[in-house]
Image (spheres, rainbow, N blue to C red):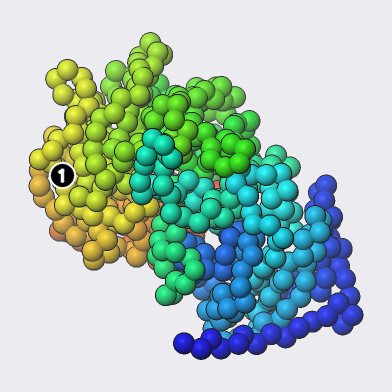
Amino acid sequence: MRHRQQEYEVVRGSERGERVATRGRRKAVAENRPSPDERTHGQTPPAGRVLHVLAHPGDALGATAAELFRALREPGRPVVVVCLARSGQTDRDRLLQVIGRGGTWRRTAESLPDGEVLDVFALSDAPHVEVCFADPAEPPAGGAPAELVDRVVDLLELFEPGTVCTLDPDPDHTGWSAATGATRPDHPEHTAVAEAVLVAVHRAAAGGLPVAVECFRSPAPCEAPSGPAPAVVRYPGRPVALTRAADGQLTAYAVLGGRLARWTERSAGAAEWGERELLDSPELLPVLAVAQTRHGWVHLVSLRRTPRPGGGAIVEVMHAVQYQSGRPLGEWRSLGNPNGNNHDKGREVGVPAVIVDAEGCLHVYARNFGRGVSCRTQRADGSWTSWQDIKGSEVQDGLAAVLDDAGAPELYAPSGGGVLRWRRNEEGAMREVADDRLPLFVAPGTAISALLTGPGRVTVYGCDVRDRMLYAYRTDRASTPIGTAGGEGVGALRMAIDGYDCTVLLQRSAEGAVAVGAYPTEQENAGLWWERTGGSGIREPAAAVDALGRLVIASLDGDGRLAVVRQDVSVSGLMLGGWVTV
C-alpha cells in the first residue's frame, strides 16, 4: 500500500525570528514557537496541557491513543506529543495524518539546552496541538541515564504540562528462565523513555513543577498499529484518595511528580480547603492505596522504583501513616517486595490494595510475578508478618479489599478467568474461595470496586470487557447490568440520601467527565441514571461523606489540581453544587 506524503508548511527562522525562554535553572531556545495566545487563538486555554513523552510515533496510536484522542476532542486543549527515539519518515507522516485528519502542519525547529533539536509540527488551524520528533545519535538507554533525564526535564520546563502520559517502565513477562531471567517482548526504548520520565518528573516536582503522571502499556507492537487502540493503564485505580478524620475533617491525597500531595479542609464540613502541600517522600510511582483505622489514622501505601544502572529497577512497597489531619506524615518505610530479593521479578509487583480489619491489623495485597496475589500484614502491636503467597492465577491489577460483617478482610481480584475471591478461614489465613469465582471479565488495567451491601453479602462492581456494560455481582450469585457512563473503572460508596440507604457509583465517562449515579442499595433493578457533573478528571474520582453527611467527590484535573464538588442538601435527592479547584 502506498503512503501519501504529508503536507507541511515550513516556517524558517528568518521569517519569524527567535524567542528565548527561561525555565528555572535552564534556558531553552525556541525558534519560531507560537506564543500561548497564538496557540489558543487568543482564548483562555482549558486547564492543563497534556504532554505525551513517548519513544516512537506508533506509541501515540497504540499505548496512549485513548488518552491522546480524548484530549484532542476537547476544544482548545493544549496537547503535545514528543517522540524521543529515532523514527522513520513514514511513521512520522502517518502519526501526523491521523492526528491532523488531513490538515496542514507548520514545521519549525526547537533547540533544547543539551543541543538536541526537535522537529516541531503545529497544526495550522489548531496550533495548540503539537507533535515533536527527536533524532538522537544513539537510542535511549535504560537505567535513566543523566543525559536522557535532563532532556525530559527540559521538555517539562519548556511545555509546563499539567499531565504527562508515558509508557510502561516494567512490562509484563511472557517467559522466565533461571539463566536469562524474564522475557519481556516490549521494545527496550519504551522502558528507557518511561524510566527517564519517572525520574525527571520527581526532579521537576522538587523544583516546583509537580505533574500528574499516567503510564500505559502497549496493547500491540508499535511499529504498525492498525489504528488508535484501547489504552491499558499500567497503574489502575483512583489517583486521588479522600479520607475523613475522627473529627470529620476531610483530607485528599495524590501522587504528583513522584511526591505525595495533600489537601486538607480548613475545618470539618467547611467549603474551603487549605493549599496543596507537597510532602517529603521517596520517588513514588503514580500509585496510592489508603486505609483508615477506627481512630482515623490513615495508612498510605505506594510503590518506589529505583532504576539500576544499565536497565532494570528495584521496586519496593512503601508505607507511611498520617496520625492527625494536617500534621506531619510519619516516616516512609519499605515493606520490601512480594517477590523477595529477585529484582527482575520484583519489577512486576502490582498496584497494592489495603484494608484495616476490626482488630486494627493492616493488610496489604499485591499481584506478584507469578500472577497470583501476595499479602503482608501489620499486626495490632505494629509488627509485620513476612510476605505470604495466597495463590490465585492470571490475576490482573485493580484489586479491591473490603470487610465482611465480622470485620474480617475479603479480597477480590480481576483475572483472566473472572473475579477471584479470598476470605479468612477459621485459622485466620486468607484462602481463595475456588467455587465463588464471579463471571465478571474486566479489561486489563481496569479497577473494580466492592462494598458490603447486606448481611453476609458483598457486591462487586466492574465493567465487563465483553459488552462494556457495568455489572453488579453479589456473592449470593445475584448479578445485574446497571448501565455505564462509558468508562471502564468504577468507584462505589454507600451512604444515606434523604434517609434511604443508597449506593453511589462513580466513573470517568468516555469523554473524560466525572459521572455519578445512585440507587437504593441492592435494588439495581430500580434503575440508575448517570449524571455528568461538569467536572473532568484523570481516571475514576474519589468520594467520601463529610462531617455534615454530604457526598463529596474529588478528582485531579488536567493541571494536577484537586477539583472538588459537594452535595447540595437544600434540595431532595442527590444534587451537586459547583466544582471548586484547589
Taking depth in this image into account, of 524 and 110 the one nearest to the observer is 110
| Residue bearing mark 1 | 437
SS for callout 1: loop
**Image point 89% across, 75% down: which residue?**
17
Q: Position of residue 230 (x, y in %)?
A: 40, 65
Taking depth in this image into account, of 452 and 383 the one nearest to the observer is 383
**Image point 17% across, 17% down: which residue?**
427
Q: Left or right? Give the position of 32 relative to 461.
A: right
Whether residue 540 is visible to the viewer of this picture, yes or no, is: yes
Whether residue 539 is visible to the viewer of this picture, yes or no, is: no
Q: Position of residue 260 (x, y in %)?
A: 57, 37
**In the depicted structure, whether residue 216 falls above or below residue 246:** below
Report the label total: 1
Q: Position of residue 142 (x, y in %)?
A: 60, 46
**In the depicted structure, whether residue 263 falls above or below residue 326:** below
Q: Left or right? Give the position of 11 relative to 126.
A: right
Taking depth in this image into account, of 108 and 357 the one nearest to the observer is 108
Q: Residue furthest front?
A: 179
**Few, some or many residues within 10 Å of mark 1 (<14, 14–19, 20+):** many
Q: Amino acid at mark 1?
A: Arg
Q: Position of residue 18 (x, y in %)?
A: 88, 71
Quadrant of res 206: top right
**Image point 46% across, 37% down: which residue?**
344
Q: Residue furthest top?
A: 381
**Image point 39% across, 30% down: which residue?**
339
